[in-house]
Amino acid sequence: MKKKFKMVDLDCANCAAKMENAIRKIDGVQEATVSFMAQRLTVEAEDSRFEEIMDQIVKACKKVEPGCQIVR
C-alpha cells in the first residue's frame, strides 16, 4: 500500500533526509520519501501491517525532530 501524508513543522532538509533514512530501515517499509519542500511523506509498506508500521514511522520522526507531526 502506498500513501501520502502531510507533515507539519518539518524545519530543515537535513532532518527530512535523516527521517527518510530511519523510515527505510523499519521492517515492512518498501519505499519512503520525505520532501522538505512539499512537507510530504510518501510511504509504501505492507498492507496487513500498515497502521503498526505508521506508528513506528511517527516514533522515528519524533526522534529526529520532536516538533514535527505527520497528519494521518
Image (cartoon, helix red, strand yellow):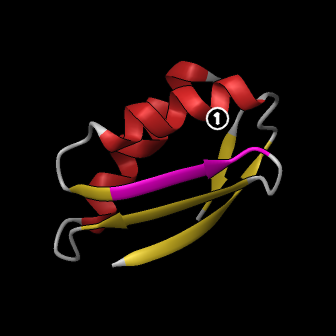
Q: Do we see residue 67 in this rendering?
A: no
Depth check, front residue: 24 or 68: 24
Asked if residue 31 lies left or right of residue 69, the reply is: left
Q: Residues within 10 Å of mark 1 (few under 14, many from 20)?
A: many
**In terms of secondary structure, where does tag 1 sit?**
helix
Task: Work out which quarter of the rendered image holds the C terminus and state it.
Answer: bottom right
Q: Position of residue 45 (x, y in %)?
A: 29, 65
| Relative vertical location of residue 2 with respect to residue 66 in this rendering, above or below | below
The image shows residue 44, relative to residue 52, as above or below, that is below
Q: Quadrant of residue 50?
A: bottom left
Relative horizontal placement of residue 1, taking residue 61 as reference (left or right): left
**Which residue range is magenta in the image?**
31-36
Magenta stretch contains residue 14: no
Give the number of callouts. 1
The disc labelled 1 sits on which kind of residue?
Ala
Q: Which residue is at a point 65% across and 23% down the rendered structure image?
A: 65
Residue 42 placement (x, y as % from top left): 53, 63
Queried whether the magenta region covers residue 33, the answer comes back as yes
* Residue 7 point in image, percent of width and height: 71, 52
Whether residue 20 sits left or right of residue 47 in the image: it is: right
Hey, which quadrant is residue 11 in on the image?
Answer: top right
Which residue lies under the disc numbered 1?
16
Q: In the rendered view, tell whether residue 3 sits above or below residue 24.
A: below
Q: Visible in this render: residue 30?
A: yes
Q: Residue at x 77, y 52 (%)?
A: 39
Q: Main secondary structure of the magenta part?
A: strand
**Where is the N terminus found, in terms of image quarters?**
bottom left
For the point 53% across and 26% down, the residue is 18
